[in-house]
Amino acid sequence: MWRGSRRRPLPWAPAAVLAALAVASCGGFRYSALLNPTVDVNVRHVPTLGLGIERVTISSNSESSTVDRIADLFSDDLGLSTDVCGAELRQRVTQMLLEGGLQVTREDDPARADVAVAINVTRCDGERERTTTSEEVVEKVNDRTRRRTVTKYQARTTVSFRALFEVTDLWTGNVVLSRSYQFEPRRTNVANRDYPEFPSASAVIGEAYRRTTRRIRPLFFGWTERRELVFFDDERCGAETGVPGRRGR
């Protein structure tokens, strides 16, 4: 059955080609890299899924557990819930895919897509906490120094977040990837005289969304990293031998 455009072959070879340049007998010379010629190279990695994807459909997992649904009924004072967090995460992932050049089809029209992506947030709750810490400071008064202890007032917001991510190849019907992403971001405001305002829950949960999308992006898009390639000129390792060195910044 016609399912949309045919898959295109991936344009790059795996980055493992560079790693194959490493020779075991040269391993002991890694620490003398400063004495050997080096060159910076760009290593191009293929998308992890490796399917040549053009169109994606995104959906939620409608089979949320009873425990998850009950937990949403007792949401904390931060106003977080798995349903709301799931909708926001799917929106972030959709935006990332569109900005990368992929097409995202409607959930009710998956026949035009190459893969179906199911995103289900199974935990999204937070807590707020006030604490104090003591810190010793040195002050200079009339050419003399003195030490005193000051109190730091802290207000912390923490979010516990977990999302399930599943990719199904619609050409074969096989689930090609299933992962769980779990983060616990937190932010702290500090003041000297009294407790400050709590960091906003939206800012903290936003960090969980960013971490999740950073993990998902390499599945669909290739990326490039800068590496230092060290050439060893030794009786055991000829100048034609290159060993990957430090990662670029």
Image (tube, rainbow, N blue to C red):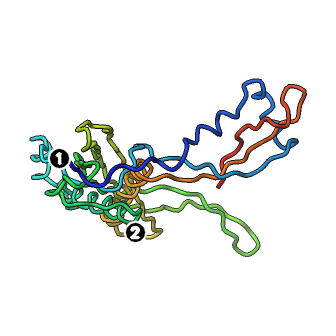
Which residue, given by chain and number where applicable, does mark 1 sit on? 61
Nearest the eye: 29 or 11: 11
Circle 1 sits in a helix, a strand or a loop, which is it? loop
Question: What residue sits 52% from the left and 53% below the top?
Answer: 223
Q: In the rendered structure, which disc, 1 or 2, sits on the residue that comes first in sequence?
A: 1
> What is the crowding at mark 1: few (fewer than 14 residues within 10 Å), some, or many (at least 20)?
some
Circle 2 sits in a helix, a strand or a loop, which is it? loop
Nearest the eye: 209 or 75: 209
Q: Is residue 157 above or below residue 47?
A: below
Nearest the eye: 25 or 136: 25
Residue 169 badge: none
Relative placement, left or right, of 213 versus 119 is right
Q: Quadrant of the C terminus?
A: bottom right
Residue 194 badge: 2
Nearest the eye: 2 or 118: 2
Question: What residue sits 34% from the left and 44% below the top?
Answer: 182
Question: What residue sits 22% from the left and 45% below the top?
Answer: 122
